[in-house]
Amino acid sequence: MMLSVNLKYSLREGRAISMARGNLTYWRGNSFYINPTSRCINDCLFCVRHFGEGVFGFNLVLDKDPTVEELVREIEETWKSKFTDIAIVGFGEPLLNLDGTIAAIRKMRELSHTPIRMNTDGQALLLYPSRDVPHELADAGLDRIQISLNAPDSDTYLRLCQPKFGRSAYDSILEFAERCKPLMRVEFSVVDIPGVDIDACRGIAKRMRIEFRVRVFKGPDGALEGILRTLTA
Ligand code: SF4
């Protein structure tokens, strides 16, 4: 793999994959995923990164962000026409590598007519105040964006997601979603965590006329108790 020279390899699904340092693409069944970065601007209590180094048997912790060329080359080498689902779902926040993400969407648009979706923490307006990220993503060919809402208010979001942008993060997420709405399909997601008012989150999505999805917590048994203690402390 692109970032894995001089590393150990093992056979998986008939091909050699890196076991040491980060895959830029990964897959399971008919879904093909792209991992533009493993950096993030949040530190969510429920983040899968607290509990492992990847998913589906792939190591997704990158030693550095790939360049546009590295990411595109890796997509070309690993994409297969059998995939019917394309997702930009990094082991971090994909939009931290905005140029890589846009190049990945463009490359996928060249390779396939399959709709392209992306998961994001929705803080692009704070990351890139001088760029029009919703339009850039739409122009590249993104069809659907799932924005992690995760909380019904900024106080809960601060405690649960610990954003580097602090209190300004939550309102910016709502504004980002609003700006994406005319351009692509938008969905809010919330991880089902005790102490988070899911109905209140659903109400926000309904008022904003945005689709809503509840995601299952993927951490180990017992972790939820610690998260709840931190949330309610
Ligand atoms: S925004 Fe996503 S990747 Fe970042 S810490 Fe939260 S769950 Fe993890």
Image: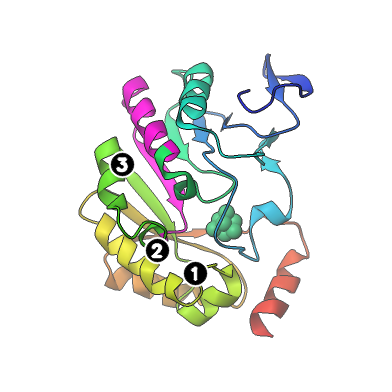
Q: Are marks 2 and 3 in contact (CB under 8 Å)?
A: no
Residue 105 colored in magenta in the image: yes
Work out how far the residue at label 2 is from the one at label 3, CA to CA, in angstroms.
22 Å
In the rendered image, the quadrant that contains the C terminus is: bottom right
Q: Nearer the viewer, residue 175 or 65?
A: 65
Q: Is residue 31 left or right of residue 8?
A: left
Quick one: label 2 or label 3, which is nearer the N terminus?
Answer: 2
Q: Give amino acid for label 1.
A: Phe
Where does the image place residue 91, in percent across and percent down from the top left?
59, 46
Q: Secondary structure at mark 3?
A: loop
Q: Nearer the viewer, residue 204 or 74?
A: 74
In the rendered image, the quadrant that contains the N terminus is: top right
The magenta stretch is: 100-123
Asked which quadrant contains residue 216, the reply is: bottom right
Residue identifier under label 1: 165
Q: Is residue 157 left or right of residue 142?
A: right
Label 1 neighbourhood size at 10 Å, few (<14), some (14-19), many (20+)? some
Quick one: label 1 or label 3, which is nearer the N terminus?
Answer: 3
